[in-house]
Every structure is written in structure tokens, then in C-alpha cells.
């Protein structure tokens, strides 16, 4: 089983994240691992959430009673990624040697996807349904979860999307609405159930809320509601709020 191309790009171009995984494996603590990797606690969890969401299986799992607080451990997939990275480093060295000019590396850097969207979910297209000038794109996420994205038919053709294509769904945190577990989402909207894992309070505005989904992926939302860590919630968002990206 190979790693998704976008995940591979993040690993190769951002080795600090691999260092974070290595420190987690050695110390079993997010707090200590973040410090060793030169990251803040929040930046460390942002990195872990992004890698977990881009991988087919979570690379890092929360654990209870970790040393130094913020306990976590690598999954079997995370350990495999660490081993794979050593091989990728060797390949990267060969590519750098093959570059004819420094501008070649700048060009490659511009072509690689970077986005301000906090939520990036790896998925596979399961269906494409035409609705006038738009297409409703069904996406299968990890472990049986699914969402819909609405894009123009022109975008479908330009990205050469078809059933089976691997894509990344991009959703800005501000586009998510957090609902109580017993609330009913609006018809036609995406609705995913999860559990509040962490609340990052903001004195100047809505709080940032990390919501763990049943498949191990994490969504980041902003909410002014009085939520508690561990509470069951739903996350609602419109298919038109889901942007799609592919690796080229």
C-alpha cells in the first residue's frame, strides 16, 4: 500500500513533521515532542491532524496518561511511515543531484499544493451526478464515512475527475457548523458525527474546536457554543463549501 501523493509531498518538503513523529515515538508525549521538534503544542496538533487526515489510516493515536501530558503514540502505520521516510530521503537526494539549475527546485516548490484551509481530508470519488451546470461529487473517506462536494461541471472536466479518482477535500474551519448530537442537519448538507477532543479558547472571538471523527480523521471548526471536551457533536457543512484538489 502506497502513501497518498499529497501526504508524501508534506513529508518530503516538511521534515520537521517527521521529526515530530520520531519524538512522539521516543517520548510518548505531545508536549515534550513538540518542544523537541521546535513547535508549539498547538502547531504540533495541527501537524498531526493534517497528517492523520491525509493518510489512509491515522499515524498518531492519543493515549491516556502519557509522560509530560498530552499523551500520544504512533500507530503501526505511523511507524511504517517513519521507516519509509529514510528511503524517501535517499530518493530526494538523488533528485536534488539531478536538478540542472536552482530555479528547477523553485519551480517544483511552486507547483506543490499548499492551502490555507484547515481541514484536508483524503478521499476517493464514489459517484458523479450532474445537476445542471454543477456536479455533485460523492466522496468516500476512510473507514466508510462519506461526504458530498458540489463543483461546476467545467471543474470536473478540468480536473479530469472520474469514479475512483483520489482527491483531497478542503474545507475552511469557518464553513463548519457544530450541532448538538441530537440536532438534525439541514436537508442536502453534509453531516458527520464526532467527539470534541480539544477546545482552544480565544478571548477575542469564537473558540477553535477539534472534533475527532469515528474514522480517526479530525475536523477543526470555530464555535461560540459552550462545548465540553468529550461531548458528542455533529458537524454540518454544505457540499458547495467543499473544495477539491488532486495531485499532479
Image (cartoon, grey):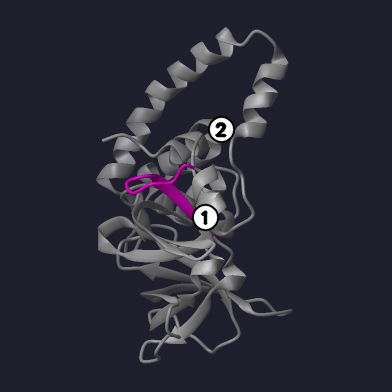
Report the magenta residues as a range.
160-170
Q: Which mark is residue 61?
A: none
- Residue 19 visible in the displayed image: no
Q: Position of residue 191 (x, y in %)?
A: 40, 76
Q: Nearer the viewer, mark 2 or mark 1?
A: 1
Q: Nearer the viewer, residue 56 or 152?
A: 152
Going 56% across and 32% down the picture, which residue do you hit? Answer: 13
Q: Position of residue 2 (x, y in %)?
A: 31, 34
Residue 161 lies within the magenta run: yes
- Residue 137 visible in the displayed image: yes
Going 53% across and 14% down the picture, which residue do you hit? Answer: 95
Q: Secondary structure at mark 1?
A: helix
Which residue does the numbered mark 2 point to in the structure image? 13
Which residue does the numbered mark 1 point to in the structure image? 153
Q: Quadrant of the N terminus?
A: top left
Q: How many marks?
A: 2
CA–CA distance in space, label 2 to label 1: 33 Å
> Sequence order check: which comes first, mark 2 or mark 1?
2
Going 43% across and 46% down the picture, which residue do you hit? Answer: 161
Q: Secondary structure at mark 2?
A: helix
Q: Position of residue 112 (x, y in %)?
A: 59, 35
Rendered image quadrant of residue 63: bottom left
Is 191 drawn above or below residue 106 in the view shown? below
Is 88 drawn above or below residue 132 in the view shown? above
Is 100 drawn above or below residue 136 in the view shown? above
Question: Label 1: how many residues lie within 10 Å, few (<14), some (14-19) or many (20+)?
Answer: some
Q: Position of residue 202 (x, y in %)?
A: 67, 76
Q: Nearer the viewer, residue 144 or 208?
A: 144
The extreme front residue here reads 132
Amino acid at each position: 500500500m502506497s502513501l497518498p501523493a499529497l501526504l508524501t509531498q508534506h513529508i518530503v518538503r516538511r521534515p520537521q513533521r517527521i521529526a515530530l513523529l520520531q519524538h512522539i515515538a521516543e517520548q510518548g508525549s505531545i508536549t515534550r515532542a513538540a518542544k523537541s521538534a521546535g513547535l508549539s503544542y498547538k502547531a504540533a496538533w495541527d501537524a498531526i491532524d493534517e497528517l492523520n487526515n491525509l493518510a489512509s489510516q491515522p499515524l498518531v493515536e492519543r493515549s491516556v496518561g502519557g509522560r509530560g501530558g498530552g499523551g500520544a503514540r504512533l500507530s503501526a502505520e505511523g511507524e511504517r511511515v517513519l521507516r519509509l521516510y529514510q528511503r524517501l530521503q535517499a530518493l530526494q537526494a538523488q533528485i536534488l543531484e539531478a536538478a540542472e539549475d536552482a530555479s528547477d527546485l523553485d519551480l517544483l516548490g511552486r507547483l506543490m499544493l499548499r492551502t490555507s484551509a484547515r481541514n484536508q481530508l483524503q478521499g476517493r470519488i464514489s459517484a458523479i451526478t450532474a445537476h445542471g451546470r454543477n456536479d455533485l461529487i460523492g466522496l468516500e473517506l476512510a473507514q466508510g464515512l462519506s461526504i458530498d462536494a458540489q463543483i461546476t461541471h467545467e471543474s470536473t472536466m478540468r480536473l479530469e475527475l472520474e469514479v475512483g479518482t483520489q482527491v483531497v477535500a478542503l474545507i475552511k474551519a469557518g464553513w463548519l457548523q457544530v450541532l448538538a448530537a441530537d440536532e438534525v442537519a439541514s436537508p442536502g448538507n453534509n453531516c458527520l458525527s464526532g467527539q470534541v477532543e480539544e477546545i482552544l479558547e480565544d478571548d477575542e472571538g469564537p473558540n477553535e474546536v477539534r472534533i475527532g471523527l469515528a474514522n480517526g480523521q479530525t475536523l477543526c471548526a470555530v464555535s461560540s457554543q459552550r462545548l465540553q471536551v468529550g461531548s458528542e457533536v455533529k458537524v454540518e457543512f454544505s457540499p458547495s463549501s467543499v473544495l477539491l484538489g488532486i495531485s499532479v
